[in-house]
Image (tube, helix red, strand yellow):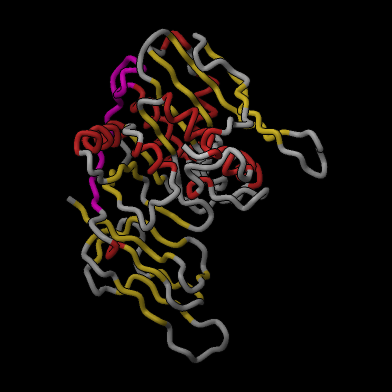
Amino acid sequence: MTKTETRPSSITATVDFEADGVHHGFLQLPYSRDDSAWGSVMVPLAVVKNGEGPTALLTGGNHGDEYEGPVALFDLAQKLTAEEVSGRVIIIPAMNYPAFCAGTRTSPIDKGNMNRSFPGRPDGTVTEKLADYFQRTLLPLADVVLDIHSGGKTLDFLPFAAAHTLEDKDQEAKCFAGVAAFAAPWSLRMVEIDAAGMYDTAAEEMGKVFVTTELGGGGSARAETIEIAKRGVRNLLCHSGILTGEIEQAPTRWLDMPSGECFVFAEDPGLVEVCRDLGDLVKAGEVIARVHPIGKTGAAPVEYRAKIDGIIAGRHFPGLVKSGDFLAVVGVAE
C-alpha cells in the first residue's frame, strides 16, 4: 500500500455501524472555509441493524441534481425499523452532499464528480476524501450495494435498473438477479463509456452485488419514478434476505447495450430537434435528432442517425448542445 492509502481518513461517523437499533447521524468531514474556519461537511446517514445477516449499502445523490434516490432513501431512513431488518442497512441519501445542497451534478466546493473520483484520497479534495471513505470503510462492510441515479439536468432516461457485464459470471448473475428483483419497468445490461473512477467499478472490483438505476431525468422527479425507486429499494432488500415479505412484482423489459454503437454524440453545437422519443423503436440509419446551427438563418441542420436497431433508452435533455454532448442511447430489446 502507498503512503496515501495507509493515511487514516479525516472523516468520522457519528453513529456506531455495529450497534443494533436505528441510528441517525452524519459522516463528519472537517472543512475549513471562509465562513467557518473550523467547519465540517456533514453528510446525513442512517444505520438500521438487527443481529447477524447481510449488509446493504444504499446511496442516492451521487450526483447532486438527481432526486429519486434522495427522496426514496430519506423516506426509508425515516420509516425503517430494526424489527423489520435481519442484518444491517446503511442509508446515505445524498452521497455527494455539497452537490446535492447546490442542486448541481458536481460539488460546488471542488467541482468533484463523485462518480469519477474513486478510489479517492484521504489527503485529497473534499470529494476525493468522501470517495476514499466509501472505498476503504463503507464498501468493505457491504454485501449488496444500490446506487440510485437518474438523468439530472442534462439527461432523460426510460426508468431502468441496471448492472454491468462482468468477468466473474457468478458475481454477474447475482447482480442481474438484483436488477430483476428491483423490478423497474426496464432492466438493462449496461456497458459504460468509461468506467474508470466509478463507484460502480470500486464496488464490483470488491466482488459486491452492485445494482444501479437511471429513473428519469431533467433535474426533477415524477411521482411515477419516485414510486419505482421506493418499491425497488424494498424489493432489493427482500431479495437480499434483509427484509421479510414478498417482492412486489412488476413487469419489466430487458435491454442490452452490446457496444459503443449504442451511443450517439453531437459533433456540432446548436439547437436539438428531437426526432424520436424515449421508448420509440428505431432502425439503424434512421434519423433520431437534428442539430440546427443557431448563429444565422438559412443553414441546414446536421442529422444524427441510429447506428443499430433498438429502442431509444436515453437522450439529451436541454434544447441546446455543444460538440461532444451525448445525444441518445439505443438499447437492444430481448
Residue name at image x 66 percent, y 46 percent? 102
x then y, percent, for residue 210: 35, 36
| In the depicted structure, whether residue 70 falls above or below residue 246 | below
Place residue 235 in its image quadrant. top left
Viewer-nearest residue: 221 or 15: 15
Residue name at image x 52 percent, y 70 percent? 320
Viewer-nearest residue: 90 or 31: 31
Viewer-nearest residue: 233 or 223: 233
Tell me which segment is drawn in magenta: 238-256
Query: Is residue 70 visible to the viewer in this orientation of the structure?
Result: no
x then y, percent, for residue 96: 57, 41
Residue name at image x 50 percent, y 82 percent? 293
Query: Is residue 57 visible to the viewer in this orientation of the structure?
Result: yes
Residue name at image x 31 percent, y 73 percent? 305
x then y, percent, for residue 30: 70, 33
Residue 250 relative to residue 63: left or right: left
Place residue 130 in its image quadrant. top right
x then y, percent, for residue 263: 33, 64
Considering every residue shown, the one lying at the far bottom of the view is 298
> Would you say residue 37 sits in the magenta stretch?
no
| In the depicted structure, whether residue 34 falls above or below residue 249 | below
